Amino acid sequence: MQNESISEKSAGLLDPRVPLAYERTLLAYERTQIAWVRTALALISFGFAIAKFYQYVRAQQGEHATLLSPRVVGLIMIIMGLTGLVVAGWQQRGAVRELRRRCPGLPRPVAGLMSWMIVFLGVLALLSALLR
């Protein structure tokens, strides 16, 4: 009888370190997602700058496009940034879903929102670089 009351008390009290560990894990996911956002933003912005600069130089000097011109490299960089960001977003979403399943009281991460805004910006940059 007394053993049952002890186990009920210990089961009712959650170790305070456990929710903190889940919060730290969630914040680590957020930091990883923000690192992907930084990397993708750098790829997208440099790719856009390279593509637009080459477009300007070609218009001024009348150079002919080669197979792997700087414009193509810029477009590839934009596509790489977008692809990396979308894959990282899906990965983070699955990891956070699993973490929230184990600890439902966790706050909603906001890095995913920033990721999708950067994806939107990257798509606009890609369309602008493609459509000249």
Image: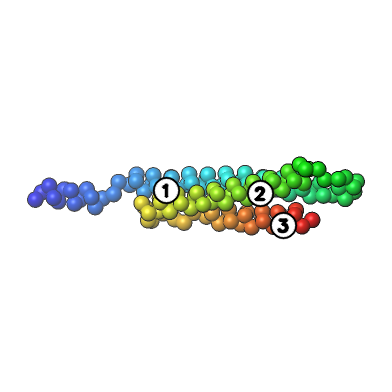
The circle drawn on residue 129 is none
The circle drawn on residue 23 is 1
Amino acid type indicated by mark 1:
Glu
Closest to the observer: 38 or 8? Answer: 38
Closest to the observer: 32 or 51? Answer: 51
Residue 70 falls left or right of residue 30: right
Residue 83 falls left or right of residue 125: left
Q: Earlier in the sequence, mark 2 or mark 3?
A: 2
Mark 3 neighbour class, 10 Å CA radius: few under 14, some 14 to 19, many 20 or more: few
Q: Earlier in the sequence, mark 1 or mark 2?
A: 1
Amino acid type indicated by mark 3:
Leu
Q: Residue at x 54, y 54 (%)?
A: 112
Q: Residue at x 68, y 45 (%)?
A: 77
- Residue ID for mark 2: 79
- Point out residue 44 in the picture as x, y percentages from the top left corner: 68, 48
Q: Residue furthest right?
A: 61
Q: Residue at x 77, y 57 (%)?
A: 131
Closest to the observer: 55 or 5? Answer: 55
Q: Is residue 9 visible?
A: yes
Closest to the observer: 73 or 121? Answer: 73
Q: Is residue 49 visible?
A: no
- Residue ID for mark 3: 127
**Could you say whether the residue bearing mark 3 is in a helix, strand or loop?**
helix
- Alpha-carbon span between mark 1 and mark 2: 33 Å
Q: Earlier in the sequence, mark 1 or mark 3?
A: 1
- Alpha-carbon span between mark 1 and mark 3: 39 Å
**Could you say whether the residue bearing mark 2 is in a helix, strand or loop?**
helix
**Could you say whether the residue bearing mark 1 is in a helix, strand or loop?**
helix
